[in-house]
Image: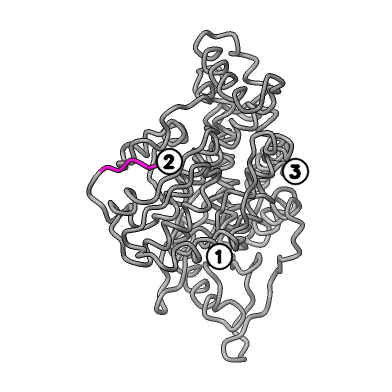
Amino acid sequence: MEEKLGFLISYLQSLKNAVSEAQIRDSFLNLLRKTLIREENFEWREIEKSVHWKGLFVGRIDLSVGKVVFEFKKSLKNRKKHKEGLEQLKIYLQTDEFKASPFGILTDGKTFEVYRLENGKLVLVDTFSLPELKNLPDLSEEEIKDLKRFLYKLDGYLIGNLKVPLTSATVVRFFGYNSQVFAKVYSALRENYEKIKDKREVLLKFNQWKRYMELVYGKNLKDELFFRHTYLSVLVKILAGKLLRFNYQNIWELLSGKIFERFGIKNYIDRDFFAWIFEEETKEPLGELFEEIERILEFKFETQNLTEELEEDLLKELYQNIVTRNEREILGEYYTPDWLVERILEEILSDKDIRTVKILDPACGSGSFLFFAVKKKKEAKVPLREILNTVVGLDINPIAVLIARTNYLLALGNELANREEEIYLPV
């Protein structure tokens, strides 16, 4: 990231010397090559591409990146130039080549206005800008944060334009044991834990977790499992917050469970062995990494209305990927494929009234049976309160309980928004 910030600073300095829109565009394209395009290895930029309307030539766009059209102006503060840029952008978004584009961007290299075309009219979606840097080459912490936000925002509109479906396989790909995210966060967790491991409250929580897990794993428990469980705990909470579309002020409000409480979900997090991440010495360095997970979920994945469309246990594969097979075998954890879960439920429920039948999974693991049982009850129009009273799970593993509760919430989906009462998850 430090290298990318250096490229951004060089880019800002190059804008001061730019005397034409073409120079601004070339400087911007150079920035993309050194940051976003190089990283993703995409061959998707075109300069002065000819565009047509019903086969007739109508002009050349300044720049296209994937499906996104860029129109450059020397300054967006010039009203005449700004209006001219909007008119050109509107034409380009109606052309044969770009009529399917999600949006176009009008920019002077520093300020970026994002528009989409609705019923023949441009609608402003977003505006973001590069910050004014006052004391170069020195940067304040706030300036560094602003530069990072700019890059993530730009990445979201360019790379995010090529989002992948959120499935159990893509979750493992982006966040599993062999992912860059896991390597970076796991290393940071170990490093930061060293700073506070001797604190009384931290040590107490760790020993509680260890005693609890030794009941199952035996005395040869390795500390590294604690950090993998911490990682899973963080990731699962962020995923739940994003998919349920909670509005929260900062990442810590989500991770502490306060946002779930405020939303009337009273026991999503009830016994958190991994609260050491909230210590003052660890919050800032870890917070930046956790926010990065949040941004990946927001910009890399298609998550709109996903809770209603979700047809699989999203987290089972991730858990099996992070917790080793040997550890799961010691615990007696053998995860059932989704297709078999559905088949078993169909067979055992075939002669029963789905509206009233009670379902208990006494070793629920990631909550696959709970997830599909809740979905079946929802399909039968069973009221929320009755679902909560008739689909219940238990597990001895605290991280499995958190994952199962998350799957339960994802299965409930819009039922959560349509209620007036507080709920307790029966897991």
What residue is shown at x 51% (from left), y 68% (from top)? 85
Front-most of 391 and 16? 391
Front-most of 181 and 337? 337
Name the side, left or right, on which 17 lies relative to 85.
right
**Sequence-first disc among 3 and 1:** 3
Is 77 within the magenta?
A: no
**Tag of residue 178:** 3
Q: Residue furthest bottom?
A: 55
Q: CA distance from mark 3 to mark 1?
A: 32 Å
Q: Amino acid at mark 1?
A: Arg
Q: CA distance from mark 2 to mark 3?
A: 30 Å
Q: Which residue is mark 1?
A: 343
Q: Magenta region: which residues?
A: 422-426
Q: Which residue is mark 2?
A: 427
**Sequence-first disc among 1 and 2:** 1
Q: Position of residue 5 (x, y in %)?
A: 66, 38
Q: Position of residue 306 (x, y in %)?
A: 48, 60
Q: Secondary structure at mark 2?
A: loop
